Image (spheres, rainbow, N blue to C red):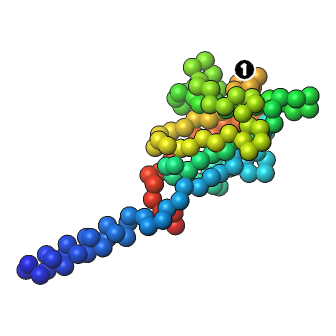
Amino acid sequence: MEARMATAAVLVLLALVHVVPEACRAERFVVGDAARWTWGYNYTDWVIRKGPFFQDDSLVFTYDPPNATTHAHSVYMMRNLADYQSCNLKTAKLVAGVTEGAGAGFEFVLKKRKMHYFVCGERQGLHCTAGQMKFIVKPKSSVCRD
Ligand SMILES: [Cu+2]
């Protein structure tokens, strides 16, 4: 009987060892890939294609600073789903301003396992409502990917 329990304990330990990652590296994702952070790209589809995302992964937003030929963009985080859906920026938190997406871009690390409601805040929410510049990410706990 005791031998059987010892065997069971070993099996549990083995199972735990198997679950605990050996080398899990966080990944970096350029939001929108080649499209970058821009008007009219479907970021909801992008999230579905790229996900799942894990805690400590990072999202890199790259967009040109305001100039004569491109629209300015920015990154805001909405407080809740209702504000996200309606693109109501009143209580949104600025994550990256119009100049912060230049060069290598702005890197946001997904530290918390919570819903992250990202939107572009330009033109009083028009980039969010009409430009599709919005997406939701909820990172999973840090475990090894498949
Ligand atoms: Cu924008």
In depth, the one of 21 and 123 nearer the eye is 21
Residue 103 lies, with reference to residue 144, above or below; the image says above
Please provide percent x and percent y for residue 86: 62, 26
Q: Residue at x 51, y 39 (%)?
A: 115
Q: Residue furthest right?
A: 68
Please provide percent x and percent y for residue 90: 61, 18
Q: Residue at x 25, y 70 (%)?
A: 12
Residue 54 lies, with reference to residue 38, above or below; the image says below
Please provide percent x and percent y for residue 144: 48, 63
Q: Residue at x 74, y 45 (%)?
A: 104
Residue 80 lies, with reference to residue 6, above or below; the image says above
Q: Residue furthest front?
A: 103
SS label for mark 1:
helix
Q: Residue furthest top?
A: 90
Query: Which quadrant of the figure contains the N terminus?
Result: bottom left
Residue 9 in which image quadrant: bottom left
Q: Amino acid at mark 1?
A: Gln
Please provide percent x and percent y for residue 127: 75, 30
Q: Residue furthest left?
A: 1
Does the rendering let one see residue 120? no
Q: Is residue 124 left or right of residue 19?
A: right
Circle 1: is it few (<14), some (14-19), or many (20+) Cα within 10 Å? few
Q: Residue at x 32, y 70 (%)?
A: 15
Residue 6 in which image quadrant: bottom left
Query: Where is mark 1, residue-wise?
Result: 124
Count of numbered badges drawn on the protein = 1
CB of mark 1 near ligand 1 (< 8 Å): no
